[in-house]
Image (cartoon, rainbow, N blue to C red):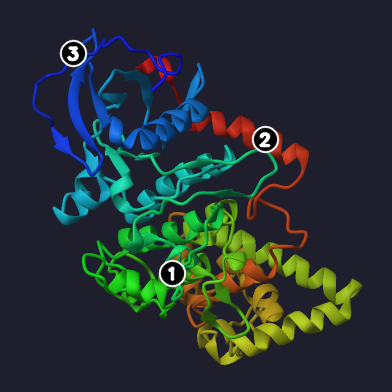
Amino acid sequence: MSSKTFSRKRKYPREASSPWKHHLFSKIYKCRKNDGTVIIEKRISKDHVKFAESEAQTFKKICNNSFHHRNVVLYLDTIADEDAISLYMEMCDGDLEEWTKKGKLNACNLTALEICKDIIEGISYLHGKNIIHRDVKPSNFLIRSSDENATIKVTDFGLSKILATDVSSAPTTSTSTEAFMAPEYHLREDGSRETSWRKSADIFSLGITLYYVLTNGRHPFGDKTSHEAPHNIQQKASPNLNLLDSVDNLSQELKELAKDLIKKMFGFDQEKKEVDFDPEKRPTIQLVKFHPLFWLSKKNIDFYKEADKWFYTQSIKNVDKYQQALKYFENEFDISINNVPPSLRNERKFPIKECGNVHQLLRKVIRNLDEHGKEKSAKSNELLGFLNNGKRDYDKFLLTLTGPYPGLLAHLWWYLRDEEIEGPYYPMKSALHYCCFIVSTLSWTVYITDY
């Protein structure tokens, strides 16, 4: 340990001489700053100095003198002595795995989807800094519930790798937790393993973590406390996503979207319609962030209307492409006028007469009823969620019109991801959009001086 690398003077007194918690390579102590703020000392012995140095280097890269991302644990200082390295960071109230096992997650006043969004934001920030976490799992996400709104924060960067500029992978011989590790990094039958780590490895582990949160502690590949889950990952066994169907607080559409996102994060072959674990097929963290699982119902409707514009444009400018798109959705969904409620088909004013393909569903049904549905009869208004007080129930609107086609939103979103679609539905590509993103990101940060 070099004295040039770290401060050597202890300046945060411990509350007790005994550790507050024990981790695999470290001991955790509660300390206090001069102003009385409780912080954490993570003390890592010299036997595991490479983990401490890796974590300290990562912290220094993701923190600067002014801002700190709200979904990354706040780093304060590093102090080294002849026996160990101590990392000082903000005090949190527990981790996702601990709180899930104890049934305490409701206490943080966040929905499962809000927790997932925080988790994704933390990993997105790391990947934006060209950092691979390499040990994404529930126990490495801390909960800070003392704030007005609880926040989930990624932590534990002992295995993380900082990629050089314009480099997509980093060589390393150390491995992460097997029950959450991508199959390409498990031992092969000949005893070898992939040693060049990529961001796609984090995406796989993140998919398992999202599943864990949504299903209240279950694992898609079996029992993670035994060898079942690591074995199934190593053998590339199909994940069990059906448990998502039993999640009580998700609509059927959200369940389909959750299954869609998670299977894509494992690596999904669209033609074979099966998880094939190909890391090249996993989405980037930016695509994960923009996935419609995290949209509100009004945004779903707006996207359907933008998709209608795309189909309409292709029907005029590129008929072959238009017909190809219609054929794709015909093979995926049995879209029929019979799935439109009779009251909407029998309306005296502007009845729905056509709904035989995806474009007719988008234009003749969703678009027209969104813009003119309130002109219908009282019975139709009730079906479409047009309330007497002038407000709208967008969930009811979507359930009535797209309920017969679970998975339609996800299919449309993936199908159109490389097309010109206006609106905040995909990662921003232009320089102007990027500048807007930087400005909006500032609202997701807090000043380090708060600590």
**Residue 60, image x and y in percent?**
48, 25
Mark 1, secondary structure of its residue: loop
Asked whether residue 386 is in view, the answer is no
Whether 342 is drawn above or below 67: the answer is below
Q: Residues within 10 Å of mark 2 (few under 14, many from 20)?
A: few
Q: In the visual, does 408 lie left or right of 233?
A: right
**Residue 162, image x and y in percent?**
54, 39
Q: Residue at x 30, y 38 (%)?
A: 150
Q: In the visual, does 358 lie left or right of 179?
A: right
In front: 358, or 55? 55
**Residue 281, image x and y in percent?**
60, 68
Residue wearing tag 1:
191
Query: Residue type at mark 3?
Result: Pro
Residue wearing tag 2:
436
Query: Residue type at mark 1?
Result: Gly
Q: Residue at x 38, y 25 (%)?
A: 75
* Mark 2 → mark 1, Cα distance in angstroms: 48 Å
Q: Residues within 10 Å of mark 1 (few under 14, many from 20)?
A: few
Whether 87 is drawn above or below 232: the answer is above
Tag on residue 13? 3
Q: Residue at x 39, y 51 (%)?
A: 136
Mark 3, secondary structure of its residue: loop
In front: 377, or 231? 231
Asked whether residue 411 is in view, the answer is yes
Tag on residue 206? none
Q: Nearer the viewer, mark 3 or mark 2?
A: 3
In front: 204, or 178? 178
Q: In the visual, does 224 lie left or right of 160?
A: left
Circle nearer the N terminus (1, 3): 3
